[in-house]
Image: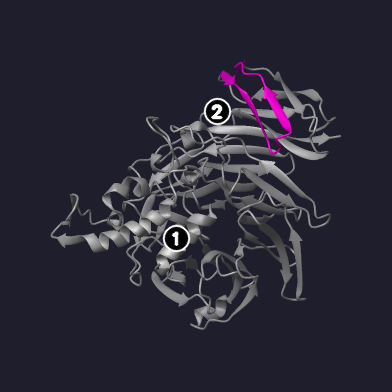
Amino acid sequence: MKKSNTRYFVVGFSILIAVVTIFTIYEEISVSPVDNISNSIEESKEGVRMTGQIIENFEEEVVEITGTPADNYPPKDRDQHCGIPGVKETPFIKEFEIPTPCTQPLSIITDSNGKVWFLQTNTGNITMFDPISEEFIEYENDLWNLKAVSMMWGIIYTEDNEIWFTDEINDFLWKFSISDKTYSKFPFPGDVKNAFPQKIGYYEGYFMINDFTGSRIVVVNHKDLDKDTITHSSISTPNGFFTSQTAVDNDGNVWFVMWKYQKDAILVKTNSMNQEFEQFSLPLKINAPNGVSIGPSGKIWIADTASSSFFSFNPEDRKVVEFITSEPPVWTFGNASGLIKTPISRPYWNAFDSDGNMWFNQQTANRLAVFNPTTESLIEYEIPSKNPGWSDCGEMTDCGTSQSFGFTILNDQVWFTEWAKNNIGVLDKTIPLFLTMTLDEKEIEIKQGQKKEIFVNIMPESNQELDVTLSGNTNSESIIVNTISDVTTITDELVRIPVTIIIDKDAHKGNYKILITTQFSDVAISTYATIKII
């Protein structure tokens, strides 16, 4: 197997870890769509020949060459990977279409002037978007020679007006000089057979890059790179472990998770100054911890891409708390075949804004979400564009996911990419919501085998009439959250709606989180309660 195919296999298997995984639910599909990308490309090299402006396939059909990055895919796969052109809007989100088709944007960042920069994984180019003029400038990468996708997950902007990014296929660390409009590339350091440079962080002049399949965290001196010298050190983990992105706390401690899918998840704390190294075992239900960030209170927050949950770890008492998202709306996964019994949202990467709220993307729920750790409330914004090629849509219209993998926060705006729709978008945090939700009780004690009724308080925040239906979600099979199925109309007054929480007689004692949600077409508004089973 060639190196590129090996990489795609690792990405498809662990995701759960890279592009698109809802198809792994289906029994009839044994490899990930990313595997199919490289396999199809290799097959096309053997079975087609160039003839003027067409590719002539000796066994099948005559195919037009588009002269765009879409040609990196077989014609039958282009709609799935490139998306049908077009943008949409919601009251909260506005999208912008990239001029070149099928660029497959991934990582995104903003510079000190408020310009938006993102990577095109199907071209190797970096693109600037001006939010004022709404114009794109695509900078051709003259050092790029790959005619296929490289999932460039990591991007960072540095104070010397440079943008650095990772390249997992070529094993390069790239620099783009904004001032000179030039590219430079550096080999990813270390003699590692299965290197996979993924996310990139920046702390006190050093890049911290998780080598996803290389079982290490690589620390690179930024100033030396600018002098064309590579100085690096590594934090090694046992062979066979994947590594998450890194996060640095206020004391300079580096945190990351080393993990094996469905086997082990170990949170690591290390400090190069005092050479301390600590490990904390995480619950076995954490299967693919990709996103790691640190909140204002010092808690470590972990996104599990193999579920609908994210977790907090308190370094002081070492307690882990699980929070579940709302269920993905049916228009994101479709389920025309009926094979999807438990759809999941797949939280991917996470980051905190200046207000202390945690943002994260939900890959298969096609949403951007924000969690307030103080109030324990959750808002999930629907991304308007969808690509049905990644879902079980059948005849359902306006169904699918945009494969939004990258986002960045700038003041009151959250910019993000749509890998399978060739768009970028922006979410305005200042747009008011339609309503607010609170609970009479946030902490509820219930005995095993018993139930309790609580009330949800809904207050409208606009003059429009709203039809509200509540739903509940929980991370425990021993807890049932019953909400009334009737639609409640909200006008201009506070409305109280009952919710019944039922505990199984064999439930384990302890604390659990439940989520109460009201879903509108463009946003889901939720609040958490703590259930203490006694």
Identify which residue, 125 or 32, lies in the foreground.
32
The structure residue drawn at horizontal position 75% and vertical position 76%, both measured from the top left corner, is 275
| Observer-nearest of 49 and 377 | 49
Q: Residue at x 61, y 37 (%)?
A: 379
Q: Mark 2 points at which residue?
A: 520
Residue type, mark 1 in image: Tyr
Q: Can residue 353 be seen in this view?
A: no
For this orientation, the residue located farthest to the left is 52
Q: In this view, does 410 lie above or below 337?
A: below
Image height of 41 relative to 383, above or below = below
Element carrying mark 1: helix
| Residue depicted at x 61% and y 35% | 326
Instruction: Determine if residue 462 is in view.
Output: yes
Q: Pointer 2: residues within 10 angstroms few (<14), some, or many (20+)?
A: some
Residue 440 lies in quadrant: top right
- Magenta part of the protein: which range? 465-490
Could you tell me what secondary structure mostly forms the magenta stretch? Answer: strand
Q: Which of 102 and 483 is in front in this view?
A: 483
Looking at the rendering, in which quadrant would you find the C terminus? top right
- The tag on residue 353 is none
Residue 418 coordinates in the image, percent (x, y): 44, 48
Residue 130: horizontal and vertical position, in percent?
A: 42, 53
**Circle 1 residue:** 8
Q: Alpha carbon of mark 2 to alpha carbon of mark 1: how far? A: 37 Å
Would you say 509 lies left or right of 348 here?
A: right
Callout 2, which amino acid? Phe
